[in-house]
Image (tube, rainbow, N blue to C red):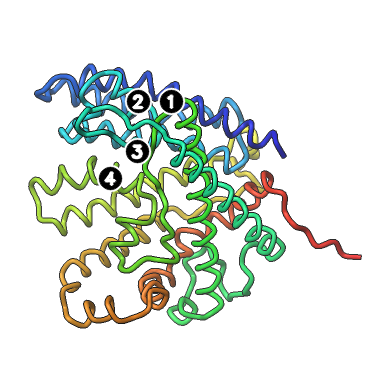
Amino acid sequence: NHWFWVQLIVLLIIPLALSTATSIIVYKFIVEPHKRSASSFLVGFGVVIPIVSSVPFYCLHFLDIRNKVIALSLIFLPIVGTFRCLEALFGYTPEPAAASLSNYCIYYGSMLEIQWDTDKKVPIRITGKYFWTAVKDYFVNFAVLNVMFSLLRPVAFAPFNTRSDAHSLDHTLWELVEPGHLINNYLAALMTSVTLAFSTIGTGLLVGLLGGFQSLRVVDRPMLQSTSPSNFWGRRWNQLVHVVLKRGVYKPIQKSFPKYIATMMVFLASGLMHEYVWAILFYVHPNRTHPETGVCADCFYPIYGKSMLFFGWNGVVIVIEYFISHFWVFQWTKHVLPGPILTILVIMVSLPIGHWFTGDWIAGGFFHHICIGFPLIVLINE
């Protein structure tokens, strides 16, 4: 369905324009003054963050957006905009980005992490090699998703039956480690990872074509090549969120508190951010609800709090790794075990509760909605 992609691109361009306008406010009132004042914090917390956080809900309401994928495209402005405002307030905007208003507009309005020439303080221009590598990766991920969706859509993206719904909190300890549950969770996480890679590469190509700038690779095969929990979260899974949280939350907190406290707060902030994303993703328009009960009979209502639990757990894992990773047994396994085995062990730390993150995407129809844009292979029953 080509109209799906047209709508998606249009909904990506609108935040680009809004973020450019917002970047001027942030630069003039927060970045440009070398000393942060009460007025800077008033503009940041009282104007910029409330505005960028509310824009998606106005779009959802007035445009009556029901496709979950198109709804998710609205998160770039509030997520990136909020944390770039925070990093500006606490003095952690990258030096090249803060060098001029034009640089900051490019940085804030790009939706991705622009790569900079730190000596010349200018964005790195897109090269032919970068562009064609991105195009290749885009279509490789497109093909992988097409195969996965073709195989998993007929079984509702969960090939193994389990006793508890994936999006629930009703699992017993035994059910959390059942092979079928773990395989379902792995496939859901892999679909999410490849979808994130596909969408961010596509956005990077859009930014490259419109502005001519290179951007950071957001996903680097976390489900296949991770060597530790910190490598998974810090080097491979969603580098865009990693860098904005690092500058907007981690560095300001680490200035006054130990590293492990700052790390834990980053994961709690990530959990809170994902709760906000869920509110956008599963927004129910008032015209779909019953006039008396206020409930939509055919809409999905997630259980909020699971993202906080999921990222809170992973924050604990990273803190534990911080204290024990130097033990000889972990260093030995890291250098002796084959890469795939090591990756499985890393993923198993959180895989039993992976449904706290991906279960709602399946039950809420996200993967069904994204299938609209793919030429799926469908078995025709004779």
The residue singled out by tag 2 in the image is 106
The extreme right residue here reads 382
Distance between the alpha carbons at the discs numbered 3 and 4: 12 Å
Q: How many labels sit on residues? A: 4
Instruction: Tell me if label 1 and label 3 are in contact, CB under 8 Å.
Output: no
Q: Position of residue 276 (x, y in %)?
A: 41, 43
Q: Is residue 223 above or below residue 124?
A: below
In this view of the protein, which residue sits in the foreground, 93 or 59?
93
Inspect the image, locate mark 2, and give the three-letter code of the amino acid beneath it.
Answer: Ile
Which SS class for mark 1? helix
Residue lying at 17% horizontally and 81% vertically, measured from the top left: 328
The residue singled out by tag 1 in the image is 211
Inspect the image, locate mark 3, and give the three-letter code of the amino acid beneath it.
Answer: Glu
The residue singled out by tag 4 in the image is 245
Residue lying at 45% horizontally and 26% vertically, measured from the top left: 16
Q: Earlier in the sequence, mark 1 or mark 4?
A: 1
The residue singled out by tag 3 in the image is 113
Distance between the alpha carbons at the discs numbered 1 and 4: 25 Å
Mark 1 or 3: in front is 1
